[in-house]
Image (cartoon, rainbow, N blue to C red):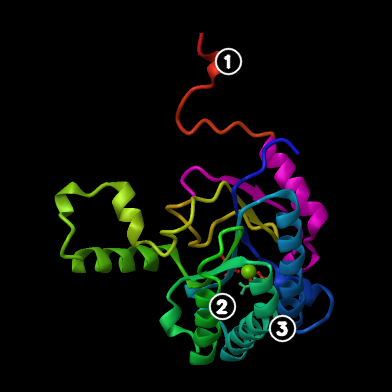
Amino acid sequence: MSCIPRHVALIMDGNGRWAQAHGLPRHEGHRRGASVVKKILRASEKIGIKYVTFFAFSSENFSRPKSEVTFLMNLCEKFFKKYRKTICEKEIRFRAIGNLSQLPLTLQLAIEELTSSTVCFDRFHITVALNYGSRNEVVHAMESLLNDKDVNIRDLTWKNFEQYLYTKDLPDPDLIIRTSGEQRLSNFLLLQSAYAELYFTKTYWPDFGEKEFLLAIEDYGARERRMGKINDKTNN
Ligand code: IPE
Ligand code: IPE
Ligand code: MG
């Protein structure tokens, strides 16, 4: 494959519509969606992507019915506990981004355990965005910045501002994939995606898999990323 993105972020959307289309309750869509995460991780490792980030729950998703929110929180917790051993054995670095302090305590604990036990790994990085929203992230960053006595606000640059974001240890995403046909970012990595390539597919997340993921990677490889500059070939 030509050019492999370093960091791919995925907006896993369409679980509810997938369930509805199959005459199933919404939570069945979420359950099946969780198994797709494994497939994407396997494919990413195979082709040499180093950072993969999943949008699992937005700050706005807390406005959904309580039963759905509880189901999603439990699903995440079970997933983290189930794969903890494998993640550690495979020396995968795990991170969670978002306002984690509002998550159920048992989920916070599972996150903390995974995060701390993988902190020294650098081979492959998995990040899960939970109770994440870019606008909240900016407000949180501003609060931390203003509380930091070492910062002179007049000398502020993007490079030091980004150190206050939840994503401070991650490179910007090169490619953002959204499933389900919606063509929006829904408050996901708005600042970090400044030069990300966007890929939209109509496939609902539970039906997404390695084949389509590789198509997205191939599509990315064919794009020209100019980052505001001009192409050398046209620069004559
Ligand atoms: C994505 O699927 C999962 C979450 C947002 C947590 P949805 O639950 O948004 O599914 P649709 O968009 O209603 O089909
Ligand atoms: C975005 O999906 C959040 C996640 C995939 C976790 P939503 O279903 O919440 O987004 P909207 O409401 O369609 O924009
Ligand atoms: Mg949705």
The CB of the residue at mark 3 lies under 8 Å from ligand 1: no
Q: Nearer the viewer, residue 67 or 226?
A: 226
Judge depth for marks 1 and 3 and give the one in front.
Answer: 1
The disc at residue 114 is 2
Residue at (66% x, 86% y) in the render: 78
Residue pointed to by mark 1: 233
Task: Give residue 9's position: percent from left, percent from top.
Answer: 59, 57
> Magenta residues?
193-221
Task: Give residue 135's position: percent from left, percent from top.
Answer: 39, 64
Q: Amino acid at mark 3?
A: His
Task: Give residue 87's position: percent from left, percent from top.
Answer: 66, 72
**Other-residue count near label 2 (Cα within 10 Å), few / some / many at <14 / 14–19 / ≥20:** many
Vertical arrangement, residue 4 with respect to residue 55, above or below:
above
Could you give the CA–CA distance between mark 2 and mark 1, rounded to whole angstroms? 47 Å
Vertical arrangement, residue 214 with respect to residue 73, above or below:
above
SS class of the residue under badge 1? helix
